[in-house]
Amino acid sequence: AWRCTLRSIGACPPAFELRQARSEGSNAIVEESAFRQVVERTVRASAPTAFPPEGRPLGFESEAFAFDTTDGGSRYFTVRGVATGGPEMPFGGTIGLAEGYVVDVTQKQREVQEHLKWRGRGGGLSLLVF
């Protein structure tokens, strides 16, 4: 799993950070710079931009996205996290923070695809029989 952080302070450009949470040999097949760009786009698209007035944090989760690995296969990932927005600053703008984890959901995604494949075949067979 990877930990990601997106910070936004007023009119300054947002800062994104992605780091590996723990060392896993299987993650070596992911090309880091391209993966970082995909994760950053996913976090920007998934994290909420409007917050309740009381400043309560909001959870977010992205849809599973595919990423082509260096060995030619595909792995599926999702981003889960929490976003918070700060109060209005005296010079304008607010501070926003989104933190979360990039989770490998390849096995789960493959199980879903397999289920849908067999469900489609079963539906096709039932149409032939009846």
Image: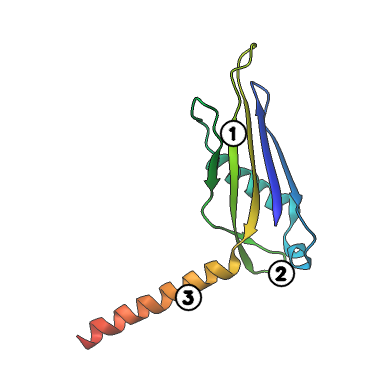
Q: Quadrant of residue 65?
A: bottom right
110 to 22, vertically: above or below: below
* Element assignment for label 2: loop
Amino acid identity at mark 3: Glu
Q: Quarter holding the C terminus?
A: bottom left
Q: Quarter holding the N terminus?
A: bottom right
* Residue ranking furthest to the top: 90
The residues tagged by marks 1 and 2 sit, at their Cα atoms, a distance apart of 37 Å
Q: Residue 68, position in %: x, y? A: 64, 62
**Nearer mark to the viewer, of 3 and 2:** 3
Q: Which residue is mark 2?
A: 71
Amino acid identity at mark 2: Asp
The residues tagged by marks 1 and 3 sit, at their Cα atoms, a distance apart of 37 Å
The residues tagged by marks 3 and 2 sit, at their Cα atoms, a distance apart of 22 Å
Residue that appears at 64% across and 48% down: 39
Amino acid identity at mark 1: Thr
Q: Which residue is mark 1?
A: 84
Q: Which residue is mark 3?
A: 114
Give the colouring mode of the picture. rainbow
Residue that appears at 23% across and 88% down: 129
Residue that appears at 64% across and 34% down: 97
Tell me if label 3 and label 2 are in contact, CB under 8 Å.
no
Numbered circles on residues, count: 3
